[in-house]
Amino acid sequence: MEKSVAERLGIAIREIRKNQNLTQEELAEKIGSSFSYIGRLERGEGNFTIQTLEKITIALNIDFFDFMSLGKKDNEIILEINSLLLQQDEENQLKGLNILKELYRK
């Protein structure tokens, strides 16, 4: 069964938060919310507002529109690769891309 938009966005939030070694409590504190609310969002049980998503992306230091493109992915491996690369500066992103190109060159 295909995941809802809220579930996919929740997965993206959880992956990025975990990759940054943040707890739900720490993320909640950064956005002025409760950890139980973050948990509901990560499980796809809560409703997102644009303002909440913006606060979350700022707290996670991720560009809002880059984050929204992650939410479109239904493949958790691709999501994790994306979130790792988005946390890097442009030089390291390019290195990661070149490594992947070398690994999968035909």
Image (spheres, rainbow, N blue to C red):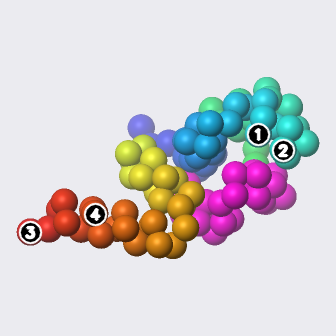
The answer for how far apart the CA atoms under marks 3 and 2 are is 45 Å
The residue lying furthest to the top in this view is 36
Q: Is residue 18 magenta?
A: no
Q: Does the magenta stretch include residue 58?
A: yes
How far is mark 1 from mark 3, CA to CA? 42 Å
Tell which residue pokes out farthest to the left in this image. 106
Q: Residue at x 69, y 58 (%)?
A: 61
Rounded to the nearest angstrom, the CA distance separating label 1 from label 4 is 31 Å
Q: List x then y, in percent, for residue 70.
A: 53, 57
Image quadrant for the C terminus?
bottom left
Q: Mark 2 points at which residue?
A: 30
Residues at marks 3 and 2 touching, judged by CB atoms closer than 8 Å: no
Kind of residue at badge 3: Lys
Task: Please provide percent x and percent y for residue 74.
Answer: 43, 49
Q: Label the magenta part by its dominant secondary structure.
A: helix
Q: Identify residue for label 4.
A: 99
> Would you say the residues marked 2 and 1 are in contact, meaning their CB atoms lie under 8 Å apart?
yes
Quick one: SS at disc 4? helix
User: What residue is pinned by disc 3?
Assistant: 106
> Quadrant where the N terminus lies?
top left
Q: Tell me the crowding category of disc 2: few under 14, some 14 to 19, or many 20 or more residues within 10 angstroms, Cα based.
A: some
Q: Distance between the residues labelled 4 and 2?
A: 34 Å
- Disc 4 versus disc 3: distance between alpha carbons? 14 Å
Q: Mark 1 points at which residue?
A: 27
Indicate the amino acid at tag 1. Answer: Leu
Q: Where is residue 16 in the image (x, y as percent from the top left)?
A: 58, 46
Q: What stretch is highlighted in magenta?
A: 49-72
